[in-house]
Image: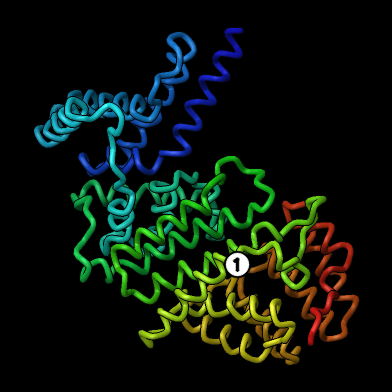
Amino acid sequence: MVNDARRIAAHHAELAARDSYGRLLSILAARTGDIAGAEDALAEALAAAVAQWPRDGAPANPIAWLLTVARRSIGHAAGRRRTAEAAAGAVRLLQDEREAAVEAPFGDQRLALMFVCAHPAIEIEAQAPLMLQTVLGLDAARIAASFLVSSATMGQRLVRAKRKIRDAGIAFAIPEPAEARTRIGGVLAAVYAAYGTAWEDVTGADDKLAGLTSEAIWLARLLGDLLPDDPEVMGLLSLMLHCESRRAARRDADGRYVPLHRQDTARWSREMVREAEALLRRASQHAQPGRFQTEAAIQSLHAHQRLTGERFTAPLAGLYDMLASFAPTTGVLVARAVAHAENGDHAAGLAQLYAIAGAGAYQPWWAAQARICWLAGDEGAAERAAQTAAGLSNDPSVRRFLLDGGFREVPAAS
């Protein structure tokens, strides 16, 4: 019984942390400017929850309980340091606790935290990872995998960034719209990275990613409220809605992977598709093309292909060329190579693929090679690449798709 109670208490603590990590961290860090210190305080609060809740019962408002305990932890730490500045922060935190309402003890300051992470004083390559860790609670190993760097490198990058925020005294506030526009690129990149990380976990096997796609879409809507005329904000939301509209069609009734060209469009969310298309039209009226508008346009073309039965391979190749000029990431360059091969230029596709440096451990690179080699008539090379791609995939359904020759499928045309 005791063990059961402990497990239940731990479960409650994990749920509270997962659902509200970013909100709690933003509130705590906003007062002290010390993200690492806030993380330590949250960790102490969670440990206290696991120790106390089995004995005393879970509190009526677990999130408020965690916030209160974390605030006290920061206050005590500040007291121990005995510095006037830290003590002032601790006093403010304890005052917040006294003034907090019981039912709604915290607001949502995640947007302010995101803009802190996108401050010009923070190195560019650390901005998006820092947002993912602080706002959405992803661990360094998961973030490192998304950005194709080692866990150690990512960990050092995050530690340096947090130290910079604390030492520079960067204000935790949403900047005025004019300044917000100078930081919006990093914020949008982080929101998209969060969405992409969760999107790849199609089976829902990773509990830490549960609900992350909805969080990312929610953050994009929040950014839209702050910058309603920013075409890239519209583009990002359009892109994510297009992808999200197809969620239910990505697996069949037996849980098998279904590629886009075979998806049952009746299972798509037409409401999301309509909203995505409307956003893309609004964004285009500004005549300021950018990365996310281009990615949304690509997804829009994919949707039109499926819904009309026509193939738009030439426009897609052109859009990928444009996207590569905005964001020449490994993922974009791989997709561009496939797009050119699908448009009939197999040699260009292979040349572009082989020109991508350091992609040997990137599963989509091998899957793309299988597809392009097959399109070029090299069955042996295609088969070998598909086997390597299958070996690099963590998803059994995707492995089966590749080993069964899914890379040979030809989309239907009108």
Q: Which residue is identified by label 1?
A: 270
Identify the image quadrant of the N terminus: top right
Q: At 52% from the left edge and 70% from the top edge, which residue is drawn? A: 239
Residue 216 vs 346, above or below: the answer is: above
SS class, disc 1 = helix
Please name the amino acid that badge 1 sits on: Arg
Q: Residues within 10 Å of mark 1 (few under 14, many from 20)?
A: some
Q: Quadrant of residue 175?
A: bottom left
Residue 157 vs 100, above or below: the answer is: below
Work out whether residue 164 or residue 261 is closer to the camera in this orientation and state it: 261
Spot occupied by residue 52 in the image (x, y as percentages of width and height) = 43, 14
Q: How is the image coloured?
A: rainbow
Q: At 31% from the left edge and 74% from the top edge, which residue is drawn? A: 229
Identify the image quadrant of the C terminus: bottom right
Spot occupied by residue 195 in the image (x, y as percentages of width and height) = 52, 58
Spot occupied by residue 316 in the image (x, y as percentages of width and height) = 62, 85
Q: Quadrant of residue 111?
A: bottom left
- Total marks in image: 1
Q: At 39% from the left edge and 52% from the top edge, which residue is drawn? A: 130
Work out whether residue 22 or residue 122 is closer to the camera in this orientation and state it: 22
Spot occupied by residue 12 in the image (x, y as percentages of width and height) = 50, 25
224 horizontally vs 411: left or right = left
224 horizontally vs 335: left or right = left
Residue 60 vs 391, above or below: the answer is: above
Q: At 87% from the left edge and 62% from the top edge, which residue is drawn? A: 403
330 horizontally vs 84: left or right = right
Residue 86 vs 362, above or below: the answer is: above
